Image (tube, rainbow, N blue to C red):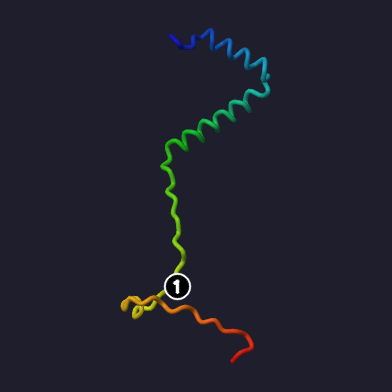
Amino acid sequence: MFGFGWMELLLVLVIVLIVFGAGKLPQLGEGLGKAIKGFKKTVHEPEPQEITEAQPTAPTSQASSAAGTPPSAPVRHEAGKT
């Protein structure tokens, strides 16, 4: 019912030839082929899963983590004081 016959396809081909010219048809076909190949590739690839990194933490010693106490805060040394 809504198919294209050979006459319709021929008419479309003639219109494309008139609009783009014979010199541009290979470039047009190549671009269309790359677009279809890229589309098929993205459709068939599984979606990459996003990995979110947690805030980096300083390594804790076995003793403080076993005791359940948080690690001590880093000591800040001021320049000029001894």
Residue 7, how many percent across, how many down?
53, 7
The residue drawn where x is 31% and y is 77% is 66
The residue drawn where x is 38% and y is 78% is 61
Q: Quadrant of the C terminus?
A: bottom right
The residue drawn where x is 36% and y is 77% is 69
Q: Is residue 38 left or right of residue 47?
A: right
Mark 1 residue type: Ala
Q: Quadrant of residue 21?
A: top right
Task: Find disc 1 in the rendering and name its residue.
Answer: 58
Q: Nearer the viewer, residue 25 or 61?
A: 61
Q: Quadrant of the N terminus?
A: top left
Q: Quadrant of residue 46?
A: top left
Residue 24, how many percent across, how many down?
66, 24
Q: Quadrant of residue 81?
A: bottom right
Q: Is residue 17 left or right of residue 63?
A: right
Depicted 59 relative to depicted 31: above or below: below
